Amino acid sequence: MSKDKKYSIEVRVWIEEAEGAFLGIGKIWLLENIRKTGSITNAAKEMKMAYRQAWQLVEEMNQRAKSPLVEKLLGGKGGGGARLTDAGERAIAVFYEVEKRIKDFAQKETQNLKF
């Protein structure tokens, strides 16, 4: 009585450095929302996250990265805001590239799963 079972390998990717987790999907979504909305406040709202938490995550990423990922814009006629730096754009691209390669590998490995 053999049942054909389907198995899959699931992976979650984050990038670590000496102080621990540096960049994972949550922070990537925050960066993408800052890019989309032009502000940390609006990015936090989009994610139903407290502004203070979003601001702390941005500060932490900026301090721990080689160069800042988010640049705060000073208020003026339209008010302040924030935008991604080239390093921030690169962080998003690199994260998704690495994640895709790892998930592709996991997908290939599922073909060998037999229990």
Image (cartoon, grey):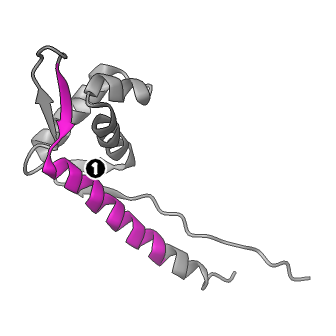
Q: Picture coordinates of residue 107 (x, y %)?
A: 54, 75
Q: Main secondary structure of the magenta part?
A: helix
Q: Which residue is mark 1?
A: 23
Query: Which quadrant, please, contains the N terminus?
Result: bottom right
The range drawn in magenta is 80-105
The amino acid marked with disc number 1 is: Leu
Q: Picture coordinates of residue 52 (x, y %)?
A: 28, 21
Query: Which quadrant, please, contains the C terminus?
Result: bottom right
Q: Picture coordinates of residue 4 (x, y %)?
A: 80, 78
In this rendering, is residue 44 above or below 90?
above
Residue depicted at x 47% and y 74%: 104
Q: Is residue 58 left or right of residue 43?
A: left
Residue depicted at x 19% and y 17%: 78
Q: Is residue 66 left or right of residue 105?
A: left
Residue depicted at x 21% and y 56%: 90
Q: Is residue 96 left or right of residue 103?
A: left
In this rendering, is residue 11 above or below 78?
below
In this rendering, is residue 23 above or below 98?
above
